[in-house]
Amino acid sequence: MSASYPRRVLLREVGVREGFQFESNVAPTRKKVALLNALAETGLTQIEAASFVSRTRVPGWSDAEAVANALNTKPDVHFLAFYMNDRGLQRARAANMLTIRGNLYATASPDFLYRNTGWTPEIELARATAMAASLAGNGISVSELTVMAAFGCNYSGEVTAATVIAKIDQLLAVCHDQGHGDNQVFCLADTMAWATPASMRQVIGAVRERWPTHRIALHLHDTRGLAIANAMVGLQMGVDCFDAAVAGLGGCPFAGHKGAAGNMCTEDFAFLCEELGVDTGIDVDQLGAVGRMAEEIVGHALPGRVKHGQSLSSYRNG
């Protein structure tokens, strides 16, 4: 193993949450629950399980409470709640099966922000401030700051590293003002798949130079086929936390793509890590079987490859 790679990486599974906000056919609650419970048997330890967002704008998650309350608990698995405002937070808190991660969001593209939420940057910052106050009031620390559209936008084009740094600065100031400290993970989200290996090096490098002690996470979309290549750059730069989606499920319904906008495939990236000698704790072939299950649920082919090709270890050991 190259010394430049982390010894172990954390893969946070977001496929069910992202996938069923993006798929046109709303999956039955029981199938979402079955998929989540199957994911929990693969070695994944953090799985986004339900999205507590507007039922009107995201009808695929109108059953968030029902899904959360039907999950099988496991001591080593955290089923995570996704929320964007105080109403969503309170709904998530009422679902006792879920782990609530304190997260604040900023968007590097004003055009995408408006299409995604109808907000201006000023409103978004005020909402982040209110969210930080609500989290503090509920005894939840802000553990992560996410910058969406961190590498570019289908509506407004390139996003500079300076813009990303300014957004992180704003969120850090909010955390400080609300008593949350300044030790958060910085999640850089390639919401519309504009990242390339070159821009990954530029943005990650700029963030690292400004905040050398902060952990960086990556949330990568594969619409243009570069998610794995971009993740490889992240590994080479020491990033050890990645969001990924089983079978390549997912995408943002407000991103302006004509075609599917899936996330980086969890089992494909876990296979890459396995071949590099980087530990994920995941059984790649078992996760591939869950990927095939996801295809059956959505009723069409999904872009992940390993779910059908299998890992090389299955051949070496066979």
Image: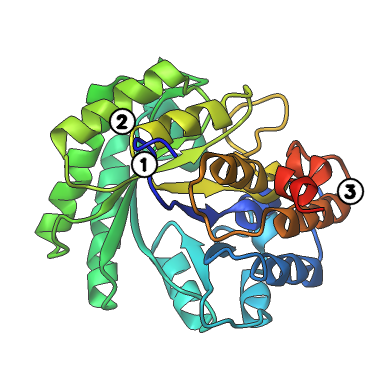
Q: Which residue in the protein does label 1 denote?
A: 239
Give SS at disc 2: helix
Q: Estimate the x, y position of residue 241 in percent, counting from the top left.
A: 41, 49
Q: Nearer the viewer, mark 3 or mark 2?
A: 2
Is residue 109 shown above or below 65? above
At label 3, which amino acid type do we have? Gly
Mark 2 highlights which residue? 204
Residue at the (39%, 32%) spot, across then down? 236
Label 1 is placed on what type of residue? Answer: Val
Q: Residue 212 at what x, y percent from top left?
A: 16, 40
Tell which of 124 and 233 is nearer to you. Answer: 233
| Callout 2 touching callout 1 (CB < 8 Å) | yes
**Residue 295 at what x, y percent from top left?**
83, 49
Please name whichever residue, 67 or 6, is drawn nearer the observer in this view of the structure: 6
Q: Looking at the image, which residue is at 35% across and 38% down?
A: 3
Closer to the chain start, of discs 2 and 1, is 2
Q: Which secondary structure lies at badge 1?
A: loop
Q: Is residue 178 left or right of residue 192?
A: left
